[in-house]
Amino acid sequence: NVHAKLQAEPCLQLTSWYKGPTLWEAMEQLELPNNNNAQQGSNKNAITGGRRQKLLEKPLRLLITDILQEQGKGVAVRAKVVSGWMAAHLDSKLAVLPLGDPTTLSKMVHVQENLQSTTADTSTSAMASSSSNNNQRSNYGVAGDLIDLVLSNVDVSRLSVGNVVVRSQPPLLAPAQKCRAKIYVLEQVTMPIIRGATAMFHIHSIQVPCFLSTLVQSMSMGHGNKKENQWKQRPRALTKHSQAVVEITLQQPIVMESFDDCRALGRFVLRRSGESIAVGRIEQVL
């Protein structure tokens, strides 16, 4: 018993600088987690599950991240499911936005499953279990999945990175050229942002030239005085460390939604001269 031996014959070199409890005594003083901590953990899991459930209940939105290759009469693309869900045997009729071209889903494969199949376990039982799970899982795609699709009856020249695939059920998501957004002006801004200022509108994987058509209201966040931290209507300029509600007009229509409806299609970055000047989220599509 090392603990008893150390108590009977304490080490002089150790006791000369350490006066605390032994390891055994420290372990005896540990307290078990109470029910409140366990309940907080379960509540956090419930919140995460609730958010995922809300994503599944929203309309289907597939964001094309790469054009892979042509396959016969179809085109293979890689896309991420940003909201909603899809089933290979149910969602055969889709539409590609912003052009609105109808297409047919011929094949769907999970990217993660392809990676797992190349590094699968060599054991027969593991391979059988993995194959069974993959066959069931590959028929469905849910929010957060990265999947490979083969789209038929669509011209590859009309597809590009940043296109959004939706169900071809009316009403279709209409592309828009103007939105009202809440932005936060970043610290590195040296020149104030005025009405009519131009910038690059970066949203998911595309960028479009834009200009600020209206400065609705703003509030400076750089002062501790509460009187100064108030919304100012129709400001003349936006400076660093300020929040603002603005209307942004794009050079061409794109697929976008409010941040509450779809986060991936509702958050953006404004860049000017190679630097980010503001981040924001779309409040309303106009």
Image (cartoon, rainbow, N blue to C red):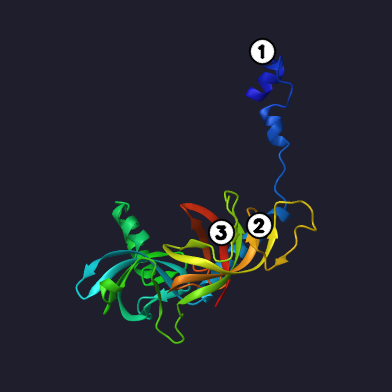
Percent position of residue 195, x then y: 58, 65
Q: Residue furthest left?
A: 72
Q: Secondary structure at mark 3?
A: strand
Circle 1 crowding by C-alpha within 10 Å: few under 14, some 14–19, many from 20: few
Asked where in the image residue 135 lies, by quadrant, the reply is bottom left
Q: What numbered label is drawn on residue 279? A: 3
Q: Which residue is mark 1?
A: 13
Residue visible at 66% across and 57% down in the picture? 242
The three-letter amino acid code for the residue at tag 2 is Ser
Q: Which residue is mark 2?
A: 242
Instruction: Indicate which disc, 3 or 2, sits on the residue closer to the N terminus.
Output: 2
Q: Please name whichever residue, 58 or 121, is drawn nearer the observer in this view of the structure.
A: 58
Q: Is residue 167 above or below residue 52?
A: below
In the figure, is residue 246 to the left or right of 124? Answer: right
**Total label count?**
3
Which of the two discs, 3 and 2, sits closer to the camera?
A: 2
Percent position of residue 209, x then y: 45, 65
In the figure, is residue 225 to the left or right of 118? Answer: right
Query: In this rendering, does residue 92 appear at all?
Result: no
> Decide: marks 3, 1 in contact (CB < 8 A)?
no
The three-letter amino acid code for the residue at tag 1 is Gln
Which of the two discs, 3 and 1, sits closer to the camera?
A: 3
Q: Please name whichever residue, 26 or 259, is drawn nearer the observer in this view of the structure.
A: 259
Percent position of residue 129, x then y: 36, 61
